[in-house]
Image (cartoon, rainbow, N blue to C red):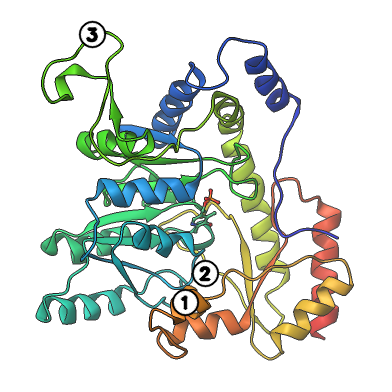
Amino acid sequence: MIPYGKHDIDDSDIEAVVDVLRHQFLTQGQQVPAFEKALCDYTEARHAVAVNSGTSGLHVACLAAGLTKGDLGWTVPVSFAASANCILYCGADVDFVDIDPATRNICTQALRKKLNTAAQQNRLPRVLVVVHFTGASCDMKAIRALTEPYGIIVIEDAAHALGGRHDGDKIGRCRYSDMAVMSFHPVKSITTAEGGAVLTNDDNLAYRCNLFAKHGITRDPSLMQGESHGPWYYQQLELGYNYRLSDLHAALGLSQLAKLDNFVAKRRELAAKYLSELTELPLALPQISSLHESAWHLFMIEVTRHDRGQVFERLQQRGIGGNVHYIPIHLHPYYRNLGFTEGDFPAAEQFYRRAITIPLFSSLTADEQTRVVKVLTEVLA
Ligand SMILES: *Cc1c(COP(=O)(O)O)cnc(C)c1O
């Protein structure tokens, strides 16, 4: 079975991890700060806070934003549940903005309308989590322009998008957002097995992300209440978590990051081939933006004249492992119990009914890709 996504690990990655195992620190050594610095160098963001998953990154970003009980956070329904769960973790309420069926990202028209209504009802969100779906950037300039007048903190869920570009900038540069969160799960652009990072240009947000990711504890006497008792002393200032990344994982991340641009170039080549070879089929294909370069985390087709379930099963029977990203968050039983229901976000629901993710990853061979195209063409004939 050809999977929809897969990590790309070579001997240099393995050596990097083994090397850490032979040395003094497995965690809290030099690898994590080196990985954080490399992420800053790559994205040109001022700060990077490495954490043990993308989900932890989203959680500390929301905590750093001051999101708390009584607040509201907004995100999109077409994402992994973590994009919304991070808001609920903080005790805040969640709501969604529907997607634009063309870009599959947050619909800026829908955002404008919802903000107007929320302003009239005095129920504006404190944070907005936007998702660069499949690796293609949202229209961050428009999102910033719409949210800035209300002081809304914009968090990019960039779990799909490391290695992509927004208007010339690397995604993670945060020119039009407050924070960007990366995931290093094995299916993403680069992997640390499990891992993530928050990028930001704001000194205070970086400090708060770090604090919340490390138990809320500081060893810096200048931040303590009262006098330090001595060199052993630390204070807990907030209710934080142990969301640290280990040095083993960071060493893998450093080694992977050096190959990121090659990985993305390979994904882009494969995506271009799909785009040219699937044009004649009864499908809606991803849009290419002239402004933003996708990181091509996923290649998603929408069946326009067939039953999605049948196509999915026939592909699987013939060795093509697909997936569907995503079951709209608001339709999960947990979210239905919060009051959401079918019909709340029609564009997201329509996308879900038609979507299939087909194999795309840097080590997909030309033969494998030819086979995907051939089987898909036959199944849709
Ligand atoms: C993968 C992913 C996450 C969560 O990242 P983990 O590292 O798996 O915790 C969050 N949001 C989106 C859009 C993702 O794809």
Q: Secondary structure at mark 2?
A: loop
Using the image, tell me which numbered label, if any, was put on residue 17.
none
Given contact means CB atoms under 8 Å apart, are the residues at marks 2 and 1 in contact?
Answer: yes
What whole-number distance in Å separates the C-alpha atoms at marks 2 and 3?
A: 59 Å
Residue 377 pos. (x, y %):
81, 77
Q: Secondary structure at mark 3?
A: loop
The correct choice, above or below, for 250 with respect to 100 in the image is above
What whole-number distance in Å separates the C-alpha atoms at marks 2 and 1?
A: 7 Å
Q: Secondary structure at mark 1?
A: loop
According to the image, label 1 marks what residue? 102
Q: Is residue 171 visible?
A: no
Determine which quarter of the picture holds residue 68: bottom left
Q: Is residue 122 left or right of residue 265?
A: left
Mark 2: give few (<14), some (14-19) or many (20+) Cα within 10 Å.
Answer: few
| Closer mark to the observer between disc 3 and disc 1 | 3
According to the image, label 2 marks what residue? 287
Residue 2 pos. (x, y %):
82, 59
- Going by the numbered disc 3, the residue's amino acid type is Gly
According to the image, label 3 marks what residue? 230
**Mark 3 vs mark 1: which is more N-terminal?**
1
259 or 352: nearer the eye?
Answer: 352
| Quarter of the N terminus within the rendering | bottom right
Determine which quarter of the picture holds residue 157: bottom left
- Going by the numbered disc 2, the residue's amino acid type is Gln
Residue 181 pos. (x, y %):
41, 47
Mark 3: give few (<14), some (14-19) or many (20+) Cα within 10 Å.
Answer: few
For image coordinates 48% across by 25% down, the residue present is 32
Beta carbon of the mark 3 residue lies under 8 A of ligand 1: no
Q: Is residue 266 left or right of residue 105?
A: right
Q: Is residue 177 visible?
A: yes
